[in-house]
Amino acid sequence: MITRQSIPLLCALACAVVVALPAAADASPLVVVDGAKQTVINDTFLAPPTADDLAAQPPPPAPAQASDGKVMATLRAALERRSINQDEYDHWREIYINALNTATVLSGRCRGQLATVISQLQRMARAGDLTPSRMPILFLQLQRNTEYWASSPNISNGGRVSFAGEFVIWQHYAGQGLQFQPLANWGRAAAVAEYCRKLGPYCISVKQSLASRIDTLISLASVRHGSTAWEYYFSFDGGAPPWMSGMAQGTALQALSVGAQVLNQAFYLQVARTALPSFSQPTPYGVAVAADGGRHYALYSFAPKTKVLNGFLQAILGLKTFAAATKDPLAIKLARLGDRAARRETPRYDTGKWSLYQRPGREESTTSYHILVRDFLRRMCRLTGAKVYCHTAARFTYYLRKRGIADNGPEAGGTAPAALGAPTGPRCGA
């Protein structure tokens, strides 16, 4: 858990203003849970779930073993080392026991979802990955899953959930329960922070909730090989937890940098600085991949050979935002290394008719991803003046017009990609 008091320790361990993620004109549905009541709202600052999110269908992990004592043993060991205090130990132990007991009385889909979240936690404990810094987010995630699946909800794959009075967005991944989603959380914070900056003195009404959201996300960070990180704790596309994303990490830098400005909170910049080492560390510990005389920042830390241009550019934009706010030498260096590689990579995503989603591969981007990467290229064009960004952005815009597709990107004054369906699905007994 990161606090103002822990920043010096994290620093010891770890030894260009851009437009934030735009608010979606087509709001994304969010289920707000308040006790037994569940309400669907449209959140204009929350981007819809991505196509990748909805395509994530890994085999369900093995069922949770109620007799597995490694989680308890890990908690006891952390208490004995004074890495956690007695109140934390008692609270997290209670959450774990309650989850085990609840799973035994549930049935069908609900039981399977909760059992999977429990088994994920148990596997991390057995692997030595249930570290003290990860305990706050992992036990909160287990607590929310226990509460949610006991209520017999109906939610589809990709649906987002938030609990009343709590500033965390959870996302449903089929067969894996509700999961902490760093990109969705930091993306929303970045969008609100940018909105607040544009409002200037008229932003008073949203400042408190923005500060509470950022403070909450800071408290749920982990220490990953000496770097502050916001990790993913579920299996995805062959990657096992815990893993991280350069895009999510860059978005966090962006939100923290703009948030520091609008809220006058220098502490946020201190936190962002402790997250920089992840861009220097090679995968799978960090997101750095040597490429084209510079450095590529991986979308998935477990897949360094998979290069996705939109994720890479957003990581660079986050670094540039922090560098512009602080003039930090390391951030400037990391942004330059990324820019150097991105200038050489960018033309490889141009098929002459459309954009590629990733390399290696010949899969074309969906329309929403094509517009997204075009908009990122436009921002890089404005920031750097590099012809490769400006030219490629113009070509991608031409492809849209040639196909007769409405240019509905946020920068064109249109709408963001529409939400991919309301978060409803079969109930747990189904």
Image (cartoon, rainbow, N blue to C red):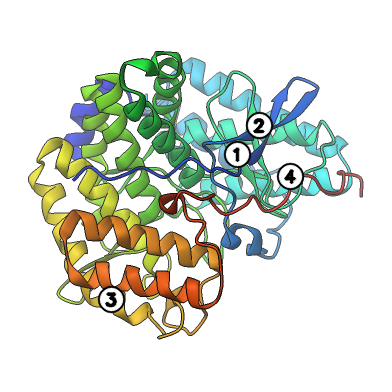
Mark closer to the chain start, 4 or 3: 3
Circle 1: residue type:
Trp
Q: CA distance from mark 4 to mark 2?
A: 17 Å
Q: Are marks 4 and 3 in contact (CB under 8 Å)?
A: no
The circle drawn on residue 186 is none
Look at mark 1 in the image and give the residue it sits on: 170
Res. 132 image quadrant: top left
Mark closer to the chain start, 4 or 1: 1
Mark closer to the chain start, 3 or 1: 1
Characterize the local packing of mark 3: few (<14), some (14-19) or many (20 or more) Cα atoms within 10 angstroms: some
Query: Does residue 63 appear to the left or right of 238 in the view shown?
Result: right
Q: Is residue 65 above or below residue 263?
A: below
**x 16%, y 48%: residue:** 331
Please state which of residues 281 and 423 is positioned toward the viewer in this rendering. Answer: 423
Characterize the local packing of mark 1: few (<14), some (14-19) or many (20 or more) Cα atoms within 10 angstroms: many
Q: Are marks 2 and 3 in contact (CB under 8 Å)?
A: no
**Residue 155 placed where, x, y %?**
77, 44
Q: Is residue 118 above or below residue 405?
A: above
Q: CA distance from mark 1 to mark 2?
A: 9 Å
Q: Provide the secondary structure element on which disc 4 rests.
A: loop
The quarter of the image holding the N terminus is top left
Circle 4: residue type:
Pro
Look at mark 4 in the image and give the residue it sits on: 423
Q: Are marks 1 and 2 in contact (CB under 8 Å)?
A: yes
Look at mark 2 in the image and give the residue it sits on: 144
**x 76%, y 49%: residue:** 156
Q: Provide the secondary structure element on which disc 2 rests.
A: helix
Q: In front of the other: label 1 or label 2?
A: 1
**Residue 19 placed where, x, y %?**
32, 44
Characterize the local packing of mark 4: few (<14), some (14-19) or many (20 or more) Cα atoms within 10 angstroms: many
